[in-house]
Amino acid sequence: MTENALGARLRDPQNVVSPRARTVWRVSAAVRAAIPALIAGCFALGGDDLPLWVWITYAVISLAYVGVMPAYRYRVHRWESTATAVYTQRGWITRERRIAPMSRVQTVDLEQHLISRLVRLATVTVTTASAAGPLKIEGLDLEVAEGLVEELTRRAEAEVGDAT
């Protein structure tokens, strides 16, 4: 729990994302870690080899990133939808907590990337009239995401006003 500007205690959003989100984040991290290694390997084939200590350091950092980041993100990522607002918490190096009142919701979208589609996960994006950009809830079971999109769309349509 943290305190807001008025000194009131804010609780973490209640819902966790799917445990399968760790798999998606781990695969994505492995791909991101492999790309620079492949590029450096191509240069090495051309005779521009890096010292062994650089390869070892990169391997250790990459393995730590692929091993630790998904587990930590899973502990941090949370979401909640109430009658009046959508709450999200996400991040791993920095933590972002966002609250979007239903009166400010403009669009609600569902997105699936290739890896997410393979493990039946989705991302729900809630666009508001905020300059901070949309709220994203990553790593939801597809059925949960579809239900949330339907629920938020229904609530946003019922709100009085123009969401600006």
Image: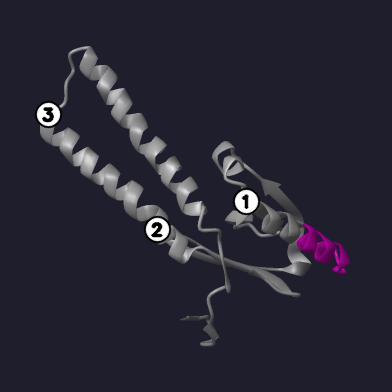
Q: Main secondary structure of the magenta part?
A: helix
Q: How are the residues colored?
A: one colour
Residue corresponding to mark 1: 123
| Nearer-N-terminus badge (2/1) | 2
Residue corresponding to mark 3: 51
| Nearer-N-terminus badge (3/2) | 3
Q: What residue type is labelled 2?
A: Ala
Q: In the displayed structure, would residue 160 be above or below residue 128?
A: below
Counting from the top left corner in percent of width and height, residue 88 is at 58, 65
How far apart marks 1 and 3 lie (CA) works out to 41 Å
Q: Does the magenta stretch include residue 163?
A: yes
- In the picture provided, is 50 more to the left or to the right than 114? left
How far apart marks 3 and 2 lie (CA) works out to 31 Å
Residue name at image x 82 percent, y 66 percent: 155
Counting from the top left corner in percent of width and height, residue 16 is at 55, 66
| Nearer-N-terminus badge (1/3) | 3
Observer able to see residue 92: no
Q: What residue type is labelled 3?
A: Pro
Counting from the top left corner in percent of width and height, residue 7 is at 51, 87
- Which of the pair 36/28 is nearer the observer? 28
Residue name at image x 70 percent, y 49 percent: 110
Counting from the top left corner in percent of width and height, residue 103 is at 78, 68
- Which of the pair 36/114 is nearer the observer? 114
Q: SS of the residue at dot 1?
A: strand
Q: Name the mark nearer the viewer: 3 or 2.
A: 2
Residue corresponding to mark 2: 71
Residue name at image x 42 percent, y 46 percent: 26
Please rate how many residues cluster around mark 3, counting C-alpha atoms within 10 Å: few if below 14, some from 14 to 19, many from 20.
Answer: few
Identify the mark at residue 158; answer none if there is no mark: none
Q: What stretch is highlighted in magenta?
A: 150-164
Q: In the displayed structure, would residue 3 be above or below residue 153?
A: below
